[in-house]
Image: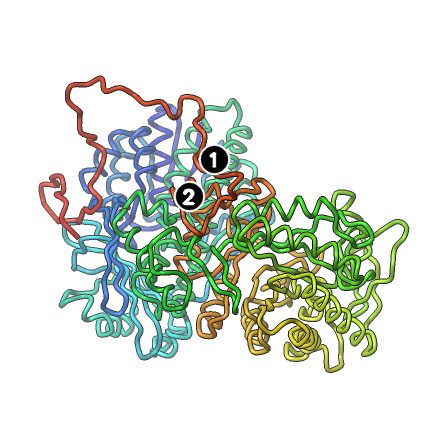
């Protein structure tokens, strides 16, 4: 093949070398506008996984790199002068300049034509004259801009400011310095990359950046290679203690807003994007160089595994895109955590460290238990001790999910809630044997609290004809039977969720067509405004004062019946686009009276309902509220709005805020993913939950006990509600206890099930193996938990030190 490569960075050079290595007859030409000796940045970090791939692909490159690596396993996290060390992580870094020199030399050895200080010809010309054009021209790719219609790029420019610097202070490990200054929280990301230097990235929220006066050079056009020396001088002053007399080094260093680059496609004919031109991931989660070199390896391999160029490029993108998108999801969680870091600095340093380590959801408590069991145990012990003074436990360390918790005056044996899930199986609103079996099995399965589905407050407040209600005494009595079973047969508590469907009512059962209107037997829906939920849905009637009063009274009557049925807790459903939620959202509430417009006005009717329900419900039993934190739509409610909504309900007596999101309108665009709604619960807990003592409940795509424990230990929520997980395994909580080898009051097995407390043996996984060697060989690949980088010119193996 005849291949043109635009951009002589690590990705473009590594790809070129691999192609020539695979087949010397390839003609590969690289155009690099900078000189060979020019390089920007300081160090680059690699994972063991990436290094393994490089070793398999090119042993010459891998051996050269390994000789120059700084290696360590520790992370030091210093919060306002208090340091904690966590080991077992495993890092390797080297100078970016040395890496480029290595790849330049390797490309030359293999016969790649590299043209430095030379702009590439026009890409249309290259596309015509070459079989393949690689655009590895970076985050500001001109090739991507030229073919934007094909690539479909999007750039998400973030609000934090950061500057890439270096220092002659050689760190012994990865360093996070987090410092509350007079202007706000600032942080340093630092790591060693050689015997003589470390990367030193300073980052802060734009508001902090302006307050500190760093915006003095805003708008200044620094020529290539010129750094913002005024800002660097101030950084030296602010972080003088951390630098310990050492120098800050600059290299084309200036303030930047990180931009996450995504593309709908990486291909345009025979032109393909590689590295930062195709995608970026925030520096707090990894290295753009690492991703670019992984791209290069995959593209070179695909070109040699498939018979045509088209098939090769399709395979390349199919193979790499899921990996990149997974990295970007983790990076997104990480960058958002650092954007909001100021809300965590009041945490205990142990919890703060755990929170920082688990920010991207890639590291969890169980993962830490494998890497650094001592630190994991310290986190468990700290959590237990911190909960005891609040009346949540006896101070004994155990898995966080099995620490008890009080919601108002209601004590729960553990932190697991069976989330409300509509079953669409009632007859005339009356729950039957199915509901008894459904909720009874979940209560027997070990959860601390079992929630009903949304129980509708009136016949016309139902979502579907199969929805349960509490608008008749016969419905109350049927619910009472279920409540009595839960109380008599388990130590779980049972909660009632009440709501009104609003404009989402009069629709088919979920499995007949979710949110699709009934073809017969329909009823008139109501809403704050006459706006349909989606195309094809019924246009609701706009509620007047009389209608609002009637619905408020329906909520009160349902609450009274729920109390008579014996429910332990009441939740008002103000989420998911149902009636109260539709008042809260500007998407569905377009009123111009006192109940529309501002957030204060949109809150008015939901708070009226909540107040009336709270007054009707027994004072000793808690009332909670479920909200949709964000609408996932432009001009809809945001996380900032969710904080104010939560604050309002707390002020009116809510004992907990159950934080979901979306379902306001059919055209929403949620960012689904593992634990994707937890950041909203986290935001509310840090802003209002912790200070008020009101519980915050996380919900949404949380499926493992490890995720639950990690959420609780990091302080992102107080309780975790899980729905589909309990449909998959009604005894999920008890099984989680068995998996964690926990036995105690937080996971009490019903007497009838007690014989099943031990996980049954399966196949040969539980086989006991005999010893067949006289002497055990040490595992040469296994590093001690704590390894520090100690510069040595000989690059000898490191010796572990106690941390």
In the image, taking residue 350 as reference, residue 257 lies left or right, namely: right
Q: Percent position (x, y) of residue 555?
A: 73, 69
Question: Foreground residue, 491 or 251?
Answer: 491
Q: Residue furthest bottom?
A: 594
In the image, taking residue 470 as reference, residue 651 lies left or right, namely: left
Q: How is the image coloured?
A: rainbow
Query: How many C-alpha atoms fall within 10 Å of the one at disc 1: few (<14), some, or many (≥20)?
Result: few
Q: Percent position (x, y) of residue 340?
A: 42, 66
Q: Which corner quadrant of the image does residue 487 belong to?
A: bottom right
Nearer to us of marks 2 and 1 is 1
Question: Foreground residue, 701 or 639?
Answer: 701
Residue at figure coordinates x 74%, y 54% from the top left: 478
Separation of disc 2 and disc 1 at Cα?
A: 67 Å
Lower position in the chain sequence, tag 2 or tag 1: 2
The residue identified by callout 2 is 6
Q: Percent position (x, y) of residue 736?
A: 46, 43
569 vs 749: above or below: below
Question: Foreground residue, 151 or 190?
Answer: 190
Residue at figure coordinates x 52%, y 68% from the top left: 409
Kind of element beneath mark 1 = helix
The answer to whether residue 252 shows anywhere in this view is no
86 vs 82: above or below: above
The answer to whether residue 156 shows anywhere in this view is yes
Q: Percent position (x, y) of residue 479?
A: 71, 55
Residue 523: which disc? none
């Amino acid at each position: 093949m005849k291949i043109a490569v635009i951009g002589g960075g690590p990705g473009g050079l590594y790809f070129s070398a691999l192609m020539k290595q695979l087949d010397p007859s390839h003609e590969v030409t690289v155009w690099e506008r900078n000189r060979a000796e020019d390089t920007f940045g300081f160090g680059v970090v690699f994972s063991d996984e990436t290094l393994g791939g490089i070793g398999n692909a090119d042993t010459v490159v891998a051996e050269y790199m390994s000789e120059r690596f700084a290696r360590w396993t520790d992370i030091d996290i210093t919060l306002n002068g208090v340091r904690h060390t966590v080991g077992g992580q495993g890092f390797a870094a080297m100078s970016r300049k040395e890496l480029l020199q290595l790849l330049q030399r390797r490309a030359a050895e293999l016969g790649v034509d590299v043209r430095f200080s030379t702009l590439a010809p026009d890409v249309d010309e290259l596309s015509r004259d070459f079989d393949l054009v690689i655009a590895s021209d970076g985050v500001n790719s001109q090739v991507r801009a030229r073919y934007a219609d094909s690539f479909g790029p999007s750039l998400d420019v973030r609000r934090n400011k950061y500057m890439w610097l270096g220092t002659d202070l050689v760190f012994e490990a990865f360093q996070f310095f987090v410092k509350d200054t007079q202007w706000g929280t600032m942080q340093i990301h630092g790591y060693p990359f050689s015997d003589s230097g470390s990367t030193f990235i300073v980052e802060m929220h734009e508001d902090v950046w302006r307050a500190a006066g760093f915006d003095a050079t805003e708008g200044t056009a620094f020529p290539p290679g010129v750094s913002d020396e005024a800002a660097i001088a101030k950084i030296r002053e602010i972080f003088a203690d951390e630098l310990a007399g050492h120098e800050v080094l600059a290299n084309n260093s200036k303030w930047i807003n990180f931009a996450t680059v995504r593309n709908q496609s990486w291909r345009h004919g025979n032109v393909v994007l590689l590295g930062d031109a195709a995608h970026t991931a925030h520096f707090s989660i990894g290295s753009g160089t690492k991703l670019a070199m992984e791209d290069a390896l995959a593209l070179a391999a695909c070109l040699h595994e498939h018979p045509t160029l088209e098939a090769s490029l399709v395979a390349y993108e199919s193979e790499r895109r899921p990996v990149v998108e997974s990295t970007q999801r983790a990076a997104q969680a990480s960058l958002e955590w650092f954007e909001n870091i100021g809300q965590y600095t009041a945490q205990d340093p142990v919890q703060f460290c755990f929170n920082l380590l688990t920010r991207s959801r890639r590291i969890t408590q169980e993962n830490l238990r494998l890497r650094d069991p001592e630190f994991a145990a310290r986190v468990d012990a700290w959590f237990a001790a911190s909960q005891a003074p609040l009346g949540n436990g006896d101070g004994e360390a155990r898995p966080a999910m099995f620490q008890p918790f009080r919601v108002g005056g209601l004590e729960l044996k553990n932190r697991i809630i069976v989330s409300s899930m509509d079953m669409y199986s009632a007859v005339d609103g009356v729950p039957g044997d199915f509901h008894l079996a459904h909720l009874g099995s979940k209560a027997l399965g070990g959860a601390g609290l079992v929630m009903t589905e949304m129980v509708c407050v009136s016949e016309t407040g139902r979502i579907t004809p199969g929805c349960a209600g509490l608008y008749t005494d016969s419905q109350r009595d049927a619910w009472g039977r279920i409540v009595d079973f839960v109380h008599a047969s388990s130590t779980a508590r049972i909660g009632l969720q009440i709501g009104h469907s609003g404009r989402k009512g009069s629709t088919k059962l979920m499995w007949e067509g979710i949110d699709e209107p009934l073809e017969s037997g329909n009823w008139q829906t109501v809403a704050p405004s006459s706006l349909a939920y989606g195309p094809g849905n019924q246009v609701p009637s706009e509620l007047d004062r009389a209608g609002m009063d009637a619905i408020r009274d329906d909520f009160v009557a349902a609450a009274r019946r729920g109390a008579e049925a014996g429910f332990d807790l009441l939740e008002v459903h103000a989420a998911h686009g149902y009636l109260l939620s539709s008042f809260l959202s500007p998407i569905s509430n377009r009123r111009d009276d006192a109940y529309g417009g501002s957030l204060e006005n949109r809150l008015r009717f939901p708070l009226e309902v909540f107040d009336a329900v709270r007054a009707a419900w027994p004072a000793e039993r808690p009332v909670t509220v479920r909200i949709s934190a964000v609408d996932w739509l432009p001009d809809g409610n945001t996380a900032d709005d969710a904080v104010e909504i939560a604050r309002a309900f707390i002020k009116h007596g809510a004992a907990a805020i159950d934080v979901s999101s979306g379902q306001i309108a059919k055209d929403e665009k949620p960012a689904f993913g593992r634990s994707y709604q937890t950041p909203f619960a986290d935001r509310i807990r840090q802003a209002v939950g912790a200070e008020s003592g009101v519980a915050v409940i996380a919900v949404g795509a949380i499926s493992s006990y490890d995720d639950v424990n990690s959420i609780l230990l990091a302080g992102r929520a107080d309780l975790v509600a899980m729905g589909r997980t309990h449909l998959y395994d009604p005894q999920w909580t008890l099984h989680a206890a068995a998996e964690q080898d926990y036995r105690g009051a937080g996971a009490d097995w019903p007497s009838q099930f007690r014989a099943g407390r031990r996980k049954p043996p399966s196949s040969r996984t539980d086989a006991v193996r005999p010893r067949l060697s006289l002497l055990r060989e040490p595992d040469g690949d296994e590093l001690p938990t704590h390894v520090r980088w100690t510069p040595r010119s000989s690059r000898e193996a490191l010796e572990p030190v106690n941390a």
